[in-house]
Image: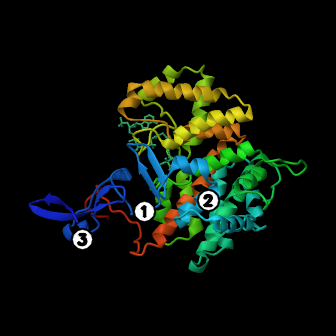
Amino acid sequence: MSTAKLIYEGQEIELPVVEGSEGEIGIDISRLRRDTGLITLDPGYGNTGSCRSAITFIDGEKGILRYRGYPIEQVANNASFTEVCHLLIHGERPNAGQLDRYRSELTRHTLLHEDMKKFFEGYPPSAHPMAILAAMVASLSTFYPDTPEEMDLNIIRILAKSKTLAAFAYKKSIGQPFIYPRNDLSWTANFLRMMFAVPSETYEVSPVLEEALNLLLILHADHEQNCSTSTMRMVGSSEANLYASISAAICALWGPRHGGANQRVIEMLEGIAAEGGDLERFLSRVRSREVLLMGFGHRVYKNFDPRARLLKAAADRIFDELGIHDPLLDLAKRLEEAALRDEFFIDKKLYPNVDFYSGIIYRAMGIPTEMFTVMFALGRLPGWIAHWKEMREDSSGYRIHRPRQIYTGENLRKFE
Ligand code: SDX
């Protein structure tokens, strides 16, 4: 095993070096404080590996993303979202029999307890659906207590019920009656029907929308230790229950620097269009740090986010298939081109991320802007669960997540 040396005040400390299966090197400082009294300082955790994980691999310099070893491009083109849930959570692709059983388990548990419908009544119509989703997911713990024996069943329950909760939150916001799940439909078709059907009319699920939703869910399914997944692990490390941990992850995702960016991208594009579409004026506001270019930049990718590439290509195809033309798509493409030519973005290695094109596709699908981050949450659910489960089942155990700090406040003083 190779080691790294740290020299501090004449004392030489040897630290073990660990290597991941893709050659990523890390200095293991887990005994640093015990042996030396020192801690490390890394605000924003840009240099900190918080765990070992076998779920998702990203090479941000090369623009590579793999789920359990499979390139995202191949998964996106060949898998169903249900298959990806199995892959991420259980580590392997299901065989045909396993997939059938998994599908039927995921459909058997789509109904909500009837009493939960009353919770929706209390929210004002203007309530953001992310607030409703987070509250409802936490509320599931009151109906389905989290015990170690029921862990697998509760994972199925949340995967199945989350789409019902999301669709009900939308129906509540537009004042329409809830549409109950229909269990002969696929995950995606069932969700689309609960979102868009109305009781008095027949609703045929469009295969174009189903395919588009499948792609979007898969592309959002996991992204290693991002803010919401780290929240999931953080909360889970206190042994809070599965639903509470997911609810916390949903809240973390909501922020505009994370999943909430997809909503902000559309609002930004609408703002630019409303002011006459002057891209140079907008980019000069970004350069002067007045605003951020939403949907751009990433902590890990210093090259194209492969998901953004796939979504850009999919946007053209989906718009063609739906026979839709959205001037915001043209504006987004022009904005991307202008930013990629601009020295400010070149110097800082800022490229479009997953949120740049996703909202434009959701919009074409008829999904309202306020639901975009809910859509991200539905896609990210298997990733959060996979990480929570990986931590809980780690044979070497896990400790409560509890960073230290460098105290910079007052020294001892008297309170008289
Ligand atoms: C997601 O982590 C994940 O994996 C997340 C995610 C997932 O799947 O889970 O990929 C999903 O959250 C995508 C990101 C969505 N957020 C946005 O699109 C919001 C806009 N982007 C940024 O706020 C920012 O780029 C972050 C939050 C995404 C990343 O933040 P970092 O890693 O802390 O980078 P930084 O803020 O330190 O940026 C480095 C420099 C800074 O300038 P300097 O101080 O060095 O001069 O680049 C600038 C930043 O000001 N910068 C931007 C910018 N993003 C970074 N300037 C203008 N517009 C931007 N979008």
Between the C-alphas of marks 1 and 2, the distance is 20 Å
The residue drawn where x is 63% and y is 71% is 154
Q: Quadrant of the N terminus?
A: bottom left
Give the mark nearer the N terminus: 1 vs 2: 1
* Residue 253 in the figure: left or right of residue 290: right
Q: Looking at the rendered structure, which numbered label has been put on residue 34?
A: 3
The residue under label 3 is which amino acid type? Arg
* Any part of residue 70 in sight: yes
The residue under label 2 is which amino acid type? Glu
* Residue 227 in the figure: left or right of residue 170: left
Instruction: Give the label, 1 or 3, closer to the camera.
Output: 1
Q: Which residue is outermost to the bottom?
A: 149
The local secondary structure at tag 2 comes to: helix
Q: Is mark 2 within 8 Å of ligand 1?
A: no
* Any part of residue 385 in sight: no
Between the C-alphas of marks 3 and 2, the distance is 44 Å
Between the C-alphas of marks 1 and 3, the distance is 25 Å
Above or below, comparing residue 310 to residue 387 in the picture = above
Q: Do residues under tags 3 and 2 come within 8 Å of each other at their CB atoms?
A: no
| Residue sitting nearer the eye, 404 or 30 | 30
The local secondary structure at tag 3 comes to: helix
Above or below, comparing residue 288 to residue 243 in the picture = above
Q: Looking at the rendered structure, which numbered label has been put on residue 53?
A: 1
Instruction: Give the label, 1 or 2, closer to the camera.
Output: 2
Disc 2 target residue: 83
The residue drawn where x is 19% and y is 67% is 36
Give the mark nearer the N terminus: 1 vs 3: 3
| Residue sitting nearer the eye, 83 or 160 | 83
The residue drawn where x is 14% and y is 59% is 8
| Residue sitting nearer the eye, 149 or 243 | 149
Above or below, comparing residue 379 to residue 398 in the picture = above
- Mark 1: give few (<14), some (14-19) or many (20+) Cα within 10 Å: some
